Amino acid sequence: MNVLFLPREGVELFRTLHLSETSRDALRFYRPHERYGGVVVTMSSLGSALSLASDLRWYVKRYMREVLFEIMDGIFCTHELAREIYYDRSVLPEEPWNYRRLYVIEDNRLVSTDKVTNTGSDIKHAGQESKISIEVWCTEHEYSLD
């Protein structure tokens, strides 16, 4: 499982996390790397991924636009949905998921988070080298925001 930390506009997140002793301490057992315009950390479980996001919450609020969790191969979910899956156990993620967004990352920055209205389309990581599309599952509440 991967955790994807997407930075705010103009933030060099990988560098920022390595400059701080606190974030270096939280990441000391992992090998974060730059990918999808953000920082990816490979974790063993959703619980440990949520724990890492919690450890880095100050950095999340200050430097990051979004934290995404890879719940299935190539499919990510939002932090809110990950919490519902793991802590509340109120959701069982399975296809087809009704509340999806397409995150488009171009030239290593998030350019759009569009709603996916049709079901069954194959949108996982489609794109060119400089443009990547990621399917992100979200809660009904997050889906209705705009």
Image (cartoon, grey):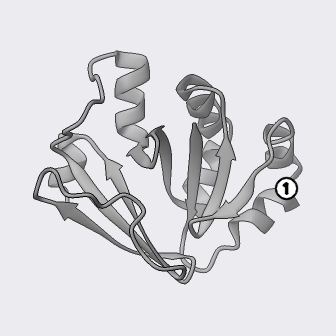
The crowding category of the residue bearing disc 1, from other C-alpha atoms within 10 Å (few below 14, some 14 to 19, many at least 20), is few
Kindly tell me whether residue 146 is visible in this rendering.
no
Residue 58 position (above or below residue 54): below
- Between 51 and 4, the one lying in front of the other is 4
**Which residue extends farthest left?**
118
- Between 22 and 143, the one lying in front of the other is 143
* SS category of the residue bearing label 1: loop
User: Picture quarter containing residue 36?
Assistant: bottom right
The residue shown at (41%, 33%) is: 82
The residue shown at (65%, 74%) is: 11
Residue 118 position (above or below residue 141): below
Count the labels in the image.
1
Residue 14's x, y, as percent? 74, 64
Quadrant containing the N terminus in the rendered view: top right
Residue 136's x, y, as percent? 35, 51
28 to the left or right of 77: right
Quadrant containing the C terminus in the rendered view: bottom left
73 to the left or right of 36: left
User: Picture quarter containing residue 92?
Assistant: top left
The residue shown at (29%, 45%) is: 138
Kindly tell me whether residue 61 is visible in this rendering.
yes
31 to the left or right of 111: right
Residue 67 position (above or below residue 126): above
Q: Which three-letter amino acid code belongs to the residue tagged 1?
A: Ser
The residue shown at (16%, 51%) is: 120
Residue 51's x, y, as percent? 62, 29
Residue 112 position (above or below residue 96): below
22 to the left or right of 72: right
Residue 42's x, y, as percent? 67, 41
Residue matched to label 1: 20
